[in-house]
Image (cartoon, helix red, strand yellow):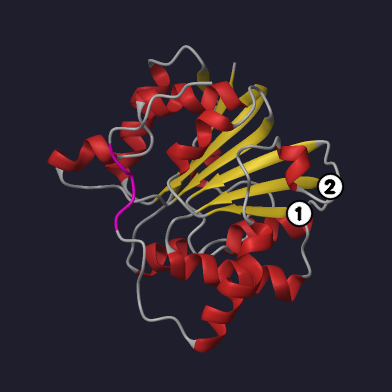
Amino acid sequence: MDDTRPPRAFFGRTRGKKLRGGQEAVLENLLPALLYDPARPPDENFAAPFPAFHIEIGFGGGEHLVARAAAHPDTGFIGCEPFINGQAKLLAKIRDGGLNNIRIWNRDALELLPFLPTAAFARAYLLYLDPWPKRRHHKRRFLSDDNLTRLARILAPGADLCFATDIDDYAGWGLARVRRSADFTWQAERADDWRLPWPGWPGTRYEAKALREGRRPCYLTFRRL
């Protein structure tokens, strides 16, 4: 296990607007049973075994994670998000959808990655993470050389790392790091491979905001070698 501690968090605040009573209740009543236990392997965190596991880092309001879990009930999903308001939104969606294949890590994802088994995941999603646009903050971007190495360890050969952003500079930043990585290759062969979302894409509220404000998202697929 890599027990080196990450030098800094990649996220900003952990709480937004005051939670409503129903959101407080769902956090209190549902979150404890759905928290991912890093001391146990993925299989033992779910009531039933799954042939495949996916991980989403920074699930926001949970729209994408819930849609994927509903479409793939035979896959176990781990969602990482320290933002409490986002956790409450996801929990309500899990409850309303009757889903049993999602577990939640409610802290910094970098604290979890060292505990995950090697080559255990068939896909990872990094969707609309904070781009930290100021140059002095670039070191806090999650898609870094070190984190690509961490992700490569938990992804099986042939697994995909799916990265979506509406910030051109962050897309270029990610591509530059993948190009110098020995663990990943960019899968695009034509413009539509990064202009169009992945099959079954449900969209997210962050994407909808970007489109309203005139920003065109990129959908980059990096294949684990």
- Cα separation, mark 2 vs mark 1, equals 8 Å
Magenta segment: 8-12
User: For the residue marked with disc 2, what is the amino acid?
Assistant: Asp
Q: Is residue 10 within the magenta segment?
A: yes
Identity of the residue furthest to the front in this view: 39
First of labels 2, 1 by sequence position: 2
* Position of residue 140 in the picture relative to residue 157 (left or right): left
- Which residue is depicted at the point 73% across and 46% down? 45
Residue 74 has which mark?
Answer: 2
- Which residue is depicted at the point 45% across and 26% down? 148
Place of residue 177 in the rendered image (x, y in percent of width and height, measured from the top left):
36, 24
- The quadrant of the picture occupied by the N terminus is top right
Place of residue 96 in the rendered image (x, y in percent of width and height, measured from the top left):
72, 76
Mark 1 residue element? loop
Q: Quadrant of residue 38?
A: top right
Q: Quadrant of residue 111?
A: top left
Identity of the residue furthest to the top in this view: 182
Q: Is residue 151 within the magenta segment?
A: no
Place of residue 142 in the rendered image (x, y in percent of width and height, measured from the top left):
37, 38
Q: Are marks 2 and 1 in contact (CB under 8 Å)?
A: yes
Residue 101 has which mark?
Answer: 1
> Can you see residue 190?
no
Mark 2 residue element? loop
Decide: is 117 above or below 210: above
- Which residue is depicted at the point 79% across and 69% down? 98
